[in-house]
Image (cartoon, rainbow, N blue to C red):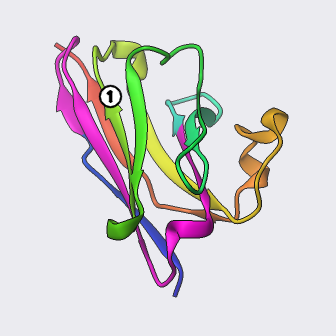
Amino acid sequence: QLQLVESGGGLVQPGGSLRLSCAASGFTLDYYAIGWFRQAPGKEREGVSCISSRGGSTNYADSVKGRFTIARDNAKNTVYLQMNSLKPEDTAVYYCAAVLNPLPKGLLFNRASYDYWGQGTQVNVSS
């Protein structure tokens, strides 16, 4: 069974850091581009960051540029999202998603473009 599992969420104070992990089971991530999305209460799910299958290309939403870093370790079948300088507005459920075929730039943060999704991990940024 193909599955993505996120972990690493939690409660952190503003200015703090968290590292989210997205681990795959049942398939290898080597050939998949991975996206991180988030959904805050009452808001639509939005793209945060994505990384190409080999890791050579990364993209970030303007709201997280300079604060978040996406990386992958294909040997561990895992993709990471390092989140620094967290703000209360970063509070959301964070999801990772996988897509087999390379996406054009305009679809990198399009939810419908992705084939597989994890169940999400909650991130709360609050003092």
Q: Which residue shows up at 40% across the image and 25% down it?
A: 68
Q: Residue 18 vs residue 105: left or right? A: left
- Nearer to me, 100 or 125: 100
Q: Quadrant of the C terminus?
A: top left
Tag 1 secondary structure: strand
Residue at image location 34% in from the left, 42% down from the top: 122
Mark 1 neighbour density, 10 Å: few (under 14) some (14–19) many (20 or more): many
Segment colored magenta: 10-37
Q: Where in the figure is residue 65, as x and y percent of width and height?
A: 49, 16
Q: Please state the horizontal and vertical placement of residue 124, each as a whole percent of the image.
A: 28, 29
- Residue at figure coordinates x 43%, y 14% from the top left: 66
Residue sitting nearer the eye, 109 or 51:
51
Residue 68 located left or right of residue 102: left
Picture quarter containing residue 60?
A: top right
Q: Which residue is mark 1?
A: 83
Q: Position of residue 43 (x, y in %)?
A: 61, 28
Where does the image place residue 30, in percent across and percent down from the top left?
53, 68
Residue 90 relative to residue 62: left or right: left
Is 111 situated left or right of 106 in this image? left
Q: Is residue 17 magenta?
A: yes
> Image point 43% across, 52% down: which residue?
120
Three-letter code, disc 1: Met
Q: Examine the rendered structure and indicate whether residue 21 appears above or below residue 68.
A: below
| Up-down relation of residue 20 to residue 78 (above or below) | above
* Nearer to the camera, 75 or 110: 75
